[in-house]
Amino acid sequence: MKRHSHLQIVAQNHFREHSSLYAFVIVLFLMGVIFGAVIVNSLSFTQKEDLFYYLSHFFTQVAEGKISSSYDMFIQSVMHNIKYTGIIWILGVSIIGLPIILILLFLKGMVVGFTVGFLVNQMGWDGFGMAFVSILPQNIIIVPVFIFITTLSLALSIKMIRRVFLKQIREPLKPVIFKYVFSFVLCMLFLVGAGAIEAYFSPVVMKTIMSILNS
């Protein structure tokens, strides 16, 4: 009970300390999502047709069970997400990494927005349903992890800038770096869970939805 309350206090202090950064990160991510959805409308008819052809081919493979093995999909998903968050995490240690972190954040949101927007644009409510079962389940975990690690990276990058250029921070770096490393390890565990959902849960639900749509 005491341990639970201690963790709760640590979490509350963390969010209180970084509330403005979290707000900024979430708004920038949502801007990326909106921008990605808007880009769909700027595609030419031919570009939409080409993309939809490949998308339809993928859905057909899912329905017929011809996609990669669940284990391969799991490894690919976990490695991709860990690499992406890992780059952001490493950039947080560097002084010049701050603008790149913001760009990667915006791009992540743009990819999500474009994917959902394209499915809805081409398939209407059926596309919304496909986006709901193929994108949402794993991103319920991935997006919060991404926002969390981005906020930590920005906070550390700002601390490094203040320490080097403004001489404002005298806090020892060792405990800060230790917490930073621990946070990334914790994020990796969550990303493994998200990878399991994407590889073992989403394809099954997608296959069910496809069979319903094709019936």
Image (cartoon, grey):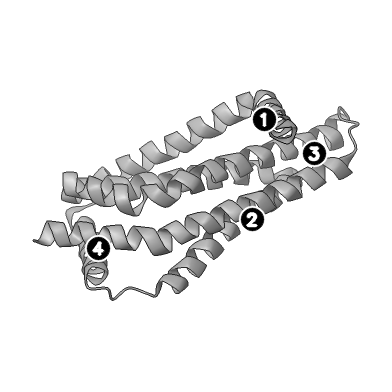
Marks 3, 2: nearer the viewer: 2
Mark 4 or 2 closer to N-term? 2
Q: Are marks 3 and 4 in contact (CB under 8 Å)?
A: no
Report x, y in % for residue 179: 77, 43
Question: Mark 2 falls on what kind of element?
Answer: helix
Mark 3 or 4: the one toward you: 4
Measure the C-alpha gap from mark 1 to mark 2: 26 Å
Q: Kindly identify the amino acid type of the residue bearing the numbered disc 2.
A: Gly
Q: Which mark is first along the chain, 4 or 1? A: 1
Q: CA distance from mark 4 to mark 2?
A: 32 Å
Q: CA distance from mark 1 to mark 4?
A: 40 Å
Query: In terms of sequence position, does the residue under pointer 3 or pointer 2 come before the other?
Result: 2
Q: Are marks 4 and 2 in contact (CB under 8 Å)?
A: no
Position in image of residue 131 (x %, y %): 29, 49
Nearer the observer: mark 1 or 2; the answer is 1
Residue 86 tag number = 2
The residue carrying pointer 3 sits among few (fewer than 14), some (14 to 19) or many (20 or more) residues within 10 Å by Cα, namely: many
Task: Tell me the residue at 26%/49% (across/down).
Answer: 118
Distance between mark 3 and mark 1 Cα atoms: 27 Å
On the image, numbered disc 1 is attached to which residue?
8
Residue for badge 4: 207
Residue pictured at 49% horizontal, 42% vertical: 106
Q: Nearer the viewer, residue 141 or 34?
A: 141
Question: Can you say whether 116 is above or below 48 in the image?
Answer: above
Labels 1 & 4 near each other (Cβ < 8 A): no
Query: x, y (%) of residue 74?
Result: 47, 66
- Which of label 1 and label 4 is nearer to you? 1
**Chain-order first, disc 3 or disc 1:** 1
- Drawn side of residue 45 relative to residue 42, left or right: left
